[in-house]
Image: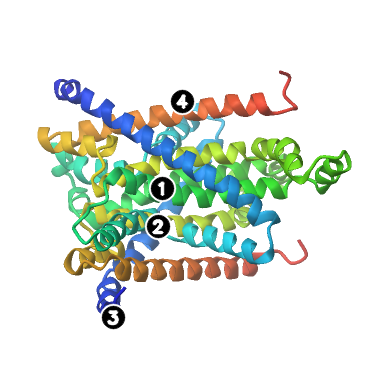
Amino acid sequence: MSFDLLLPAFSAILSGLFLTLLITICGFALGQAIALPVALALVSTRVWLSVPAAFYTFVVRGSPLLIQLFIIYYGLGQLEFIRESFLWPVLRSAVYCAILAIALNSAAYSARVVAGAIRQLHKGQFEAGHALGLTDHAILSKVVLPQVYRVVLPAIGNELVLVMKASTLASAVTVIEMTGAARLFVARTYAPFEAFLIAGILYLVFGALFGWTFKIIEARVAIPGR
Amino acid sequence: MLDSIVQYSPQLLQGLWVTLAVAAGSFACGLAMALFLAPVGHYGPPVLRRLVAGYVGLIRGLPELLIIFLVFYGGTVLLTRMRGAYFEVDALSAGIASLSVVSAAYCTEILRGALAGIARGQWEAAIALGLTHLSAFTKVISPQMVMRALPGLGNQWLVILKESALVSIVGLEELMRKSVVAAGATHQPLAFYLTAAVLYVLVTGISSLAINLISARLDPNSTR
């Protein structure tokens, strides 16, 4: 360990922090947005909804994120109609591909968690909603989801940390986020301990920050006395 | 497209074999470490308990890729300094070492949770029957611990199987790396990455079926 290298390593890695946070937050938000409809499809009684959703979560949870990222970034560009479609400006960019791959991956895991929470909900909740004359949509948004999201909030907070750890994979498709920046620094200076130590500390700090944020949200939305 | 997959299939299968070896090796090493760390972390003196908890927390907070890089590049620098001549850590050892460190932390947490779920009365009854502490642990506590931990451990095996793909980034010739090479040589990335994904899904699918079968057999409430 050389202390002279700590400061240059810190500034080099800090330059990747923005991309790490961008990929983490966008990937997480998009993932949660996709997770809800997938979860609803998973618990649906309509087979044409539940079977594709189950297949999606099975395949995504059964293969490594790295290969999913490579399919989206390297694989899709091979197809002519993708290159000519309006999606190409998005799929051509490594950062967008990383966000998309991480979101699709995180959505599969989160959807299973949300679907599990919906199944745990007492049947009487649905019956009472119907008896009160609520529409299906109102039952979902006013009765089911508020209870489901309170239950899964800790798991979602954990998912945010997992997404941050997954964002390191973007460095495999040319994105210079924190891990990519640390690796470049190592290639230039041959100082792996300094670089990866600093990157590791930054990941731990942001992981703790995300954890606290979710603790605060949990406390805010908790129903008093329950 | 099919021709090139057939042409590269021996390569892919060889890669799959390396993937399985890395995953099995690191899972076994990690589990062995956890079988030692979990009892220490649960029954040991407060200092050791805190150390084990710190290790688990540290590893769980760090990205796996960062740990792989640290072991691979850090190991190379360390060994080069020790030997006085350039020495590169091979990707296989670096991969197994780093994934072992990771899975040890997660397995420790799983086993510790399983230990916490076993009633104190089990210990007291075993000691009252005249068993030594060691045989109480090996004959009474650990079978219950393994049974409770099995779903978590099975899940950890699936996680390690998928994480082993990350070692391809430092050049290990496993399934992921083999498909990258084949994709580059044939200019057909989609076909090869999809094939590799199917192979991963097959292995994880078969693994989860096997895990469910073993869990059902070990469950004392099951009919068999």
Q: Quadrant of residue A15?
A: bottom left
Quickly name the residue at label 3: A7
Structural distance between the alpha carbons of marks 3 and 2:
22 Å
Drawn side of residue A207 relative to residue A146, left or right: left
Count neighbours of disc 3 (C-alpha within 10 A) and say few if under 14, some if 14 to 19, many if 20 or more: few
Quickly name the residue at label 4: B206
Drawn side of residue B186 relative to residue A60, left or right: left
Asked if the residue at tag 4 contacts the one at tag 2, i.e. Cβ–Cβ closer than 8 Å, the answer is: no
Q: Quadrant of residue A19?
A: bottom left
Structural distance between the alpha carbons of marks 2 and 1:
11 Å
Q: Chain of mark 3?
A: A
Q: Chain of mark 1?
A: B
Asked if the residue at tag 1 contacts the one at tag 2, i.e. Cβ–Cβ closer than 8 Å, the answer is: no
Q: Position of residue B80 (x, y in %)?
A: 24, 59
Q: Position of residue A192 (x, y in %)?
A: 28, 65
Counting residues from the N terminus, which is met first, the one under dot 4 or under dot 1?
1
Is residue A143 visible in the rendered image? The answer is no
Q: Position of residue A166 (x, y in %)?
A: 38, 54
Count neighbours of disc 4 (C-alpha within 10 A) and say few if under 14, some if 14 to 19, many if 20 or more: few
Q: Quadrant of residue A64?
A: top left
Asked if the residue at tag 1 contacts the one at tag 3, i.e. Cβ–Cβ closer than 8 Å, the answer is: no
Counting residues from the N terminus, which is met first, the one under dot 2 or under dot 4?
2
Q: Position of residue B21 (x, y in %)?
A: 37, 34
Drawn side of residue A112 relative to residue B131, left or right: left
Quickly name the residue at label 2: B63
Structural distance between the alpha carbons of marks 3 and 4:
49 Å
Q: Secondary structure at mark 2?
A: loop
Say which quadrant the N terminus of chain A sits in: bottom left
Q: Residue at x 72, y 43 (%)?
A: B134
